[in-house]
Image: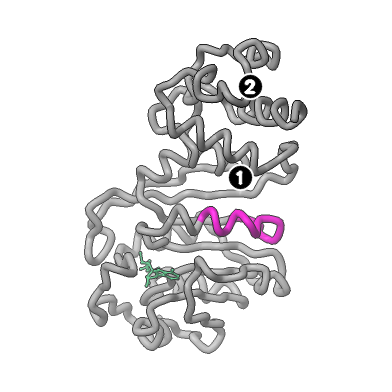
Amino acid sequence: MKPFTPDQHQAKKRFGQNFLHDYGVIERIVKCIQPKESDNIIEIGPGLGALTREILPHSKKIAVIELDRDVIPKLKFNCDRAGELTIYEQDALKTDFNQFSQAGIMRVVGNLPYNISTPILFHLFQFLPTIQDMHFMLQKEVVERIVAQPGSKTYGRLSVMTQYYCHAQMLFLVPPESFDPPPKVDSAIVRLKPREEKLAVADFELFSGLVSDAFNQRRKTIRNVWKKRISAQELVDVGLDAGARPENLALEDFIKVANYVASTR
Ligand SMILES: C[S@@+](CC[C@H](N)C(=O)[O-])C[C@H]1O[C@@H](n2cnc3c(N)ncnc32)[C@H](O)[C@@H]1O
């Protein structure tokens, strides 16, 4: 394989560019992904190809989505079999991922630009029926929020909504020195597997709205947070403590409340 030359490009802050150069970390990510020849891999933000060039020897179908057109020639230069890559020079946030599903169920990977990682996750949640799994490098705090359980400080809207869609697992931490330039934060790899069985939510908009309202006022009790939607007695009737705080409710509790409110309209 060609030597990797990540110093060939001046990183652009506005694109969240922190290029991975730690080979040990790259190898560990590839081991976690376990790419197979028949996989339909979609990489978001390949940059200079640190990950791409290590996945290419394993998989035949790789599509990459990169917003910064200046890195594309360097990405091609760094990859031994660049001709086998399908390159989309576009914004992942505006990409219709259904277009890739003709090549089979997708495996989405990427060392995401941290400034837009949450919007990218919510964008991808629209395409879950055609996604097998996702492996992302994100800011460590974001991964902690994704996998957080009720009662923890980091548990919030991102935890509930991600866990509604997916099983989430933090795989390992990555220090700033593994990147060039080093970010100001620690990073972590997360694996997201879409739930095989969709959870029974009667009205998704209502559920999502109740979750947002709850965590926008996380210090209040649920009786107060939702007083216009459901009474304290009704909360007790669905099996909840009306004096609990949103951070103490499990995903299933939010669903119970949402389905109850939906049934009373
Ligand atoms: C953190 S860097 C990772 C680069 C490379 N994968 C690596 O690990 O070294 C994020 C990459 O995402 C690209 N990017 C930023 N915003 C994007 C967007 N909206 N859509 C697609 N790619 C984007 C950046 O240009 C950059 O190449």
User: Which quarter of the rendered picture does the N terminus lie within?
Assistant: bottom left
Q: Residues within 10 Å of mark 2 (few under 14, many from 20)?
A: some
Taking depth in this image into account, of 177 and 160 the one nearest to the observer is 160
- At x 50% / y 70%, what residue is drawn? 55
**Residue found farthest to the right:** 263
Question: Is residue 126 rendered magenta in the image?
Answer: yes
- At x 49% / y 59%, what residue is drawn? 120
Measuring from the top left, give residue 113's x and y in whole percent: 38, 62
Quadrant observed for ligand 1 in the rendered image: bottom left
Q: Residues within 10 Å of mark 1 (few under 14, many from 20)?
A: many
Measuring from the top left, give residue 62's x and y in whole percent: 57, 75
Question: Is residue 150 rendered magenta in the image?
Answer: no
Taking depth in this image into account, of 32 and 126 the one nearest to the observer is 126
Q: Is disc 1 in contact with disc 2, using a CB cutoff of under 8 Å?
A: no
- Side of 121 relative to 76 (left or right): right
Give the labeled residue for mark 2. 230
